[in-house]
């Protein structure tokens, strides 16, 4: 048995005054069936045809199945995107680690061969560009301070060396060359020719302290 709540029709015949008129769905499903009974003064029409009840039940089942299919497809989409991210980023991270290790090994070998004294580093950092004649290409790097130079070896290739005897100032700033990155603070080195070189480090205060004795008037 199936039933619907519908509105009464004021213009209904006297014999059906107060009876209900089925809505569109009920009328469509009940076409060809005259087995209806009306309850006076009630907003309900009931179909006693089992076939109609079965068709309504089947329609509701299809709707539930449709929502389940939509939910399943959304879940598969999210899992697919997550898997794609893993496939893309895992090799990239491994490559960056290998490049970082290779860059550090090459830098340490070069410093050892030159007889320089390491003041701080090597360690992971981020080169944030520069003004003047230094490279403006930003990127992750290995950075090291020796008694002769401040060196940046970028993981994507390229290198920046700032001679210690050219450093005339060092400071910390949130913004550098018009760029602000979250709440991070730049370490900015100024050289004799007015150029500035910026970078990020894990402990920028320690880098400022290490660089300050190298500055000259």
Image (cartoon, rainbow, N blue to C red):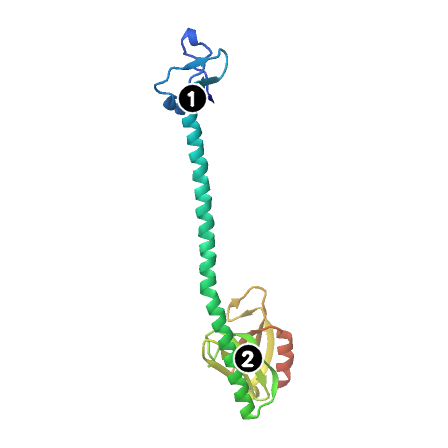
Q: Quadrant of residue 183?
A: bottom right
Please provide percent x and percent y for residue 209: 65, 79
Let me know if residue 152 appears in the view.
no
Front in this rendered view, residue 124 or 58: 58
Q: Secondary structure at mark 1?
A: helix
Residue at the image position 62 percent from the left and 78 percent from the top: 207
Q: Secondary structure at mark 2?
A: strand
Distance from disc 2 to disc 1, alpha carbons, whole Å, reads: 81 Å
**Which numbered disc, 2 or 1, marks the residue that appears first in the sequence?**
1
Please provide percent x and percent y for residue 153: 50, 80
Q: What is the number of the mark on residue 50?
A: 1
Let me know if residue 111 appears in the view.
yes
Please provide percent x and percent y for residue 54: 42, 26
Please provide percent x and percent y for residue 98: 50, 76
Q: Is residue 29 above or below residue 66?
A: above
Q: Is residue 111 above or below residue 173?
A: below
Q: List the single residue furthest toward the left.
A: 32
Residue at the image position 56 percent from the left and 64 percent from the top: 182
Residue at the image position 58 percent from the left and 86 percent from the top: 146
- Read off the residue under disc 2: 143
């Amino acid at each position: 048995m199936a039933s619907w709540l519908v509105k009464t029709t004021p213009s209904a015949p006297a014999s059906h005054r107060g009876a209900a008129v089925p809505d569109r769905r009920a009328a469509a499903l009940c076409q060809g069936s005259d087995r209806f009974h009306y309850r006076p003064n009630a907003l309900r029409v009931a179909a006693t045809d089992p076939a109609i009840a079965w068709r309504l039940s089947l329609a509701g089942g299809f709707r539930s199945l449709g929502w389940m299919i939509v939910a399943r497809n959304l879940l598969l989409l999210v899992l697919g995107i997550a898997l794609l991210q893993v496939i893309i980023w895992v090799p990239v991270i491994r490559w960056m680690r290998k490049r970082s290790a290779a860059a550090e090994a090459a830098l340490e070998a070069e410093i050892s061969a030159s007889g320089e004294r390491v003041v701080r580093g090597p360690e992971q950092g981020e080169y944030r560009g520069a003004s003047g004649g230094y490279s403006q290409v930003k990127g992750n790097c290995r950075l090291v301070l020796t008694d002769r130079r401040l060196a940046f070896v970028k993981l994507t290739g390229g290198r920046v060396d700032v001679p210690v005897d050219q450093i005339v100032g060092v400071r910390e700033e949130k913004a550098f060359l018009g760029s602000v990155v979250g709440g991070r603070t730049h370490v900015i080195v100024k050289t004799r020719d007015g150029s500035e070189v910026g970078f990020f480090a894990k402990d920028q205060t320690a880098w400022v302290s290490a660089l300050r004795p190298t500055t000259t008037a």
